Amino acid sequence: MDLIRGSWPTPLYRLKSFGEEEVWGKLEFMNPITHSIKDRTALSLYEEVLEKTSKGDAVVEASSGNMAVALASLSAGYGRKMIAYISTRTAKAYKVMLKLLNAEIRERMGGTNDMIEEVKKEAKIASAHHPNQFNNPRNYLVHYRETARELDEQLRAAGLRIKYIVAGLGTAGHMTGLSLYFKEKYGNGIKMIGVEPMDTIPGIKEYSGNPFQEIAQIDEIIKVSLREAINGIKLVASHDGLLIGPSSGAVVAAIKKLGLSQVVGIFPDDAWKYSDLLDSALK
């Protein structure tokens, strides 16, 4: 846990990709375990694991990738077994990392929402703790208490005035926490813009029906395609030399679509895990 906290604050970087426009990226892929924002959420969920369970109890969770790896890493450090439910569509890199961390992998068809009931049953049978990232308020509270405060301090220290924060919508934990903090402090002075996919983009999904939907304070939601997200990845790679992932590329695409300036985009993940997808798209 100290390793994760020791990586904060993650950098706030002005993107050359947008020329004279003031577009900043919060580089959450600089977190140390999964190179993603999910390290923060996993840390918060694991604090609950340690509070509510006995030494040696297993952890079981459904995940599209990063959360499973982050929880498996923490479980390895605390001498616990991790049972990871993942989709058959999950990128190979995640499966390799889970095996390295001695996690038990359960591959299933469909998405993570389709696995929840089976995960709950396994938790009872195996006397394992199910953090349930999709409904657990710790998912967004860590971003309200830590990520948002950290970003606010960085902006104030640099004398920056922003008008927008743009973030992808997956479990929507980081967008929910950020929106609660910045709306509480700045009201409508800062607009919160969520990004969801037109098709399949790793790391983000449709927001409709999200458990945190009634809590989050989002001003606008914009859809982007996988092609637009990949173009965002290519833009930032060629102008800034940063290898951002598809969910980050989707944030770039949304900022470009809306023609925003004085904006911070949250970059939750890097490109390395998605080399197969990107290789196909670049051909």
Image: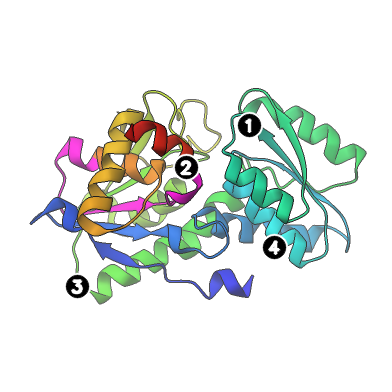
Is 229 on the left or on the right of 85, as rendered? left
Q: Which residue is mark 4?
A: 47
Q: In x, y percent, where is residue 187?
A: 28, 52
**Residue at image location 72% in from the left, 32% down from the top:** 107
* Callout 2 crowding tier (Cα within 10 Å): few <14, some 14–19, many ≥20: some
* Callout 4 crowding tier (Cα within 10 Å): few <14, some 14–19, many ≥20: few
- In this picture the colour scheme is rainbow
Pick out the residue farthest to the left: 20
* Callout 3 crowding tier (Cα within 10 Å): few <14, some 14–19, many ≥20: few
- Indicate the amino acid at tag 2: Tyr
Q: Magenta segment range?
A: 255-273
Please say if the residues under marks 2 and 4 sit with CB atoms less than 8 Å apart. no
Q: Which mark is residue 274?
A: 2
Alpha carbon separation for disc pair 4 and 1? 23 Å
Say above or below: 115 vs 80: above
Q: Earlier in the sequence, mark 1 or mark 2?
A: 1
**Residue at image location 53% in from the left, 51% down from the top:** 140
Alpha carbon separation for disc pair 2 and 4? 29 Å
Q: Which residue is mark 1?
A: 112
Please say if the residues under marks 1 and 2 sit with CB atoms less than 8 Å apart. no
- 236, 223: nearer the viewer: 236
